Image (spheres, rainbow, N blue to C red):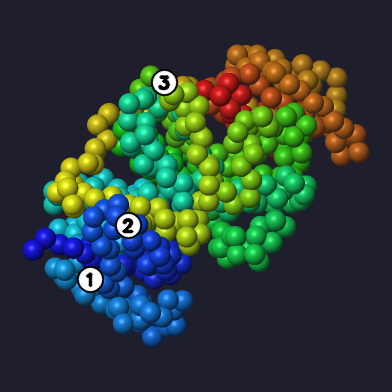
Amino acid sequence: MEKQVVKVGLMGFGTVGTGVVRIIQAHQEDLQKQTGLGIEVKKILVQNAEKGRALSSMSSSLTTDPSELLDDPDIDVIVEVIGGISPAKEYILRALEAGKHVVTANKDLMALHGAEILNKAQENGCDVFYEASVAGGIPILRALVEGFSSDRITKMMGIVNGTTNYILSKMSQEGADYAEVLKEAQELGYAEADPTSDVEGFDAARKMAILATLGFHSPLKLEDVDVKGISSVSKEDIAYGKQLGYDVKLMGLARRDGEAIEVSVQPTMIPKSHPLASVNGVFNAVYVYGEAVGETMFYGPGAGEMPTATAVVSDLVTVVKNMKLGVNGRGTVAPYKEKILKDDSQKLSKYFLRIVVADKRGVLAQITHLLADKNISLEQVIQQPYNNGEQAELIMVTHSSSKRDMDDVIAYLEQMDIISEVKSCYRVEGGDRL
Ligand code: HSE
């Protein structure tokens, strides 16, 4: 007899796992109408089966033994929301070898070992979907793979980390210091006790590697992403940025010119008029530029129980629809383009520079001379007295320059006697919207 109910093995019963069960229970009838099959969570892998759970109705399904899910022929799909590399990777590979489809929310795993997992899935005729791994409840991976399949994407800019967006938004709204806002974010539960992965940009880098791979059809890896976090962003940078018409965001940038690609995560100045500038607090957004469609932007919650769970269950719905049609494992398109990475001379952008200089005759001339030598011209300049007028602070926005030329200029500035300190240097993006 044909299968009437698809049985799911859920690995992890924390915040997202609980949301997954809630959505499957609450929308059972709609899900059945859409897929033609019932969906039932048969077993849930937990670390401690005795611990009290928000959904006590599931207590008889809990187990601490992964084999109860992986070796059960009745379980068709594994939903992995444990996170981290090990043991999630071993469990997923075992599941695929056993012919089970996989839905995962695991950005670490997909950014670092995505190719291995997807190859294993193809070998075994299985589906692997991972919508929840990037930007929580925003269906951006599906949009890239399906919605933009007929277009050629040339640029993606993502605010894909809620913690850092919360911190930078608060610093901007309240004129507050980084350390002060980070502490408050930790107290409110928006930032982890060890915030390194978020504030140093590593979490966002994983998400950008996944986005760029899908958007550009090229096998981009985590080590291909240039990463800089927000821990050195000061309230002065934000205030001067505002004065010049910019907001500071931790921006994931994936861009291709011809076939040459760059991917980075770094604090970036964007014009206040850019749609990404209005993305504040813990929200995420991904701006996608396609040659045919032009500008698009996807906005929403990047984390949280129910938003992330919708992404997971929607992937599950796709797996079940594929089961009904008998086409599992046939939809995945492996990256088919050669990976060509830009060198630093090809990475072009405007820059915001803040430096403290001696307030003496000819200083500005020496600096502009140095910039001119590197073909860098200035678009905006502010000069302010600094340190009771003994020095001056220079804030400059350049016209487009290469990263190589700008790095050379900074290395040179740092050695000049007239320069006390290069306080900050950020890319300025989004002015041309392309
Ligand atoms: N820590 C992430 C953030 C959420 O702050 O956006 C999970 O990816």
Residue at the far bottom: name it.
Answer: 50
Task: Provide the secondary structure element on which disc 3 rests.
Answer: loop
Task: Provide the secondary structure element on which disc 1 rests.
Answer: helix
User: Which amino acid type is shown beneath numbered disc 3?
Assistant: Ala
- The answer to whether residue 109 of the structure is visible from this angle is no
Q: Residues within 10 Å of mark 3 (few under 14, many from 20)?
A: few
Compared to residue 129, the image places residue 8 above or below, namely below
User: Which amino acid type is shown beneath numbered disc 2?
Assistant: Leu
Pick whichever of labels 2 and 1 is earlier in the sequence. 2
Compared to residue 265, the image places residue 154 above or below, namely above
Circles 2 and 3 in contact, beta carbons < 8 Å: no
Q: Position of residue 101 (x, y in %)?
A: 22, 56
| In front: label 2 or label 3 | 2
Circles 1 and 3 in contact, beta carbons < 8 Å: no
Give the residue pinned by disc 1: 69
The residue shown at (31%, 73%) is: 44
Q: Is residue 357 left or right of residue 412?
A: right
Give the residue pinned by disc 3: 292
**CA distance separating discs 2 and 3:** 34 Å
**CA distance separating discs 2 and 1:** 23 Å
Q: Position of residue 432 (x, y in %)?
A: 58, 21
Q: Is mark 1 within 8 Å of ligand 1?
A: no
Q: Which mark is residue 31?
A: 2
Q: Position of residue 207 (x, y in %)?
A: 43, 46
Residue at the far left: name it.
Answer: 1
